[in-house]
Image (cartoon, rainbow, N blue to C red):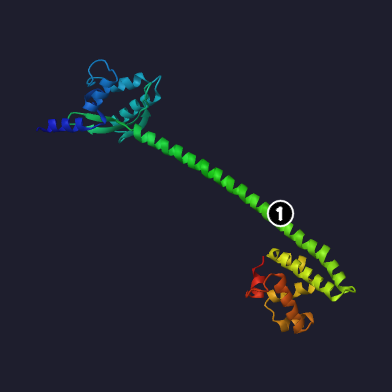
Amino acid sequence: MSRQNMYQVILNSLVTHVAVLDHQGIILETNNAWQNYARENGMQGAVDCVGIDYLKVCDSCRDGDCEAASVGTAIRRVLSGELPEYTTQYPCHSPTEQHWYSLRVLPYRSEEERRVIVTHEDITQMILIQEELRAKEEQLRSKAEKLEETNIAMKVLLDHRSRDRQELENRFLANIRELVLPYLERLNTGKLQQREKALISIIREHLEDISSPFLHRLSALHLLLTPQELEVSLLVRQGKSSQEIGDILNISVATVSFHRKKLRKKLGLEDRSQNLRTYLLSLQ
């Protein structure tokens, strides 16, 4: 096989549309892919397009097709050596289908003169895939934004709910301290039978049992503990021993132990092995 024949076989094996132009922009030869495209699109005359002034075709589209005009200018600049090469993408849609092409202009110097190779490669599938990816990215971005908005709304609702619950718990504890316990104390200091005092003690213990689940915050302690119990709890939280607490509050160690026992009962720790200070430190 001669070198020319091999060149022609290689040229025709390409699916890219290829045309070789002389220094004036006249088409010298084209490959089969170029010719098949011309035939499929109803070109009149020779489908190899040999002898057609490609630059003139580009110039004739100047009024209606800015892309074609730019291609004509670029080919001249590559022929003159001003540009090393030129690449662009352009749409070429039919009434029934959409197509995109990548055009490339490369210099080619033969023994006689400077020439250029013009190629048109169908990149429709690549463009469609890119557009599909962009659409999916936009969908994902939109979903992410909506999810973020939902998360923010949920956080606001949860914050409101937490504040409402905290307010309700505080009100409940305050009502027990201010509206119930004082009257129990008054009853307990009155002239009561032993059985009646026992009933009051049971009522108080039950109120403490009911209140203990709500004492999960340090601020809630102020609503149910007596002033001295509160002082003892704060010193226990600081790590003070019973002897140190007694010295600070000017009370006996036995009284401190009594208050510690009452604290464990009010905090629901009476039947649990958890350390009182550890529990107090866990309160927020």
Up-down relation of residue 32 to residue 283 (above or below): above
Quadrant location of the C terminus?
A: bottom right
Observer-nearest residue: 248 or 258? 258
Residue at image position (73%, 57%) is: 168
Observer-nearest residue: 213 or 243? 213
Residue at image position (30%, 22%) is: 55
Up-down relation of residue 163 to residue 112 (above or below): below
Q: Is residue 207 left or right of residue 94?
A: right
Asked if residue 31 shows in the view, the reply is no
Residue 196 location in percent, x, y? 84, 72
Name, please, the residue furthest toward the top: 44
Quadrant location of the N terminus?
A: top left
Residue 64: quarter of image: top left
Name, please, the residue furthest toward the left: 1
Residue 242 location in percent, x, y? 71, 82
Name, please, the residue furthest toward the right: 191
Q: Is residue 37 left or right of residue 251?
A: left
Asked if residue 183 shows in the view, the reply is yes
Q: Is residue 58 left or right of residue 198?
A: left
Residue 126: quarter of image: top left
Total of numbered circles in the picture? 1
Observer-nearest residue: 208 or 250? 208
Residue 253: quarter of image: bottom right
Q: Secondary structure at mark 1?
A: helix
Residue position for label 1: 164
Residue 110 location in percent, x, y? 19, 31
- Amino acid type shown at disc 1: Asp
Observer-nearest residue: 4 or 156? 156
Q: Residues within 10 Å of mark 1 (few under 14, many from 20)?
A: few
Up-down relation of residue 121 to residue 234 (above or below): above
Residue 48 location in percent, x, y? 22, 22
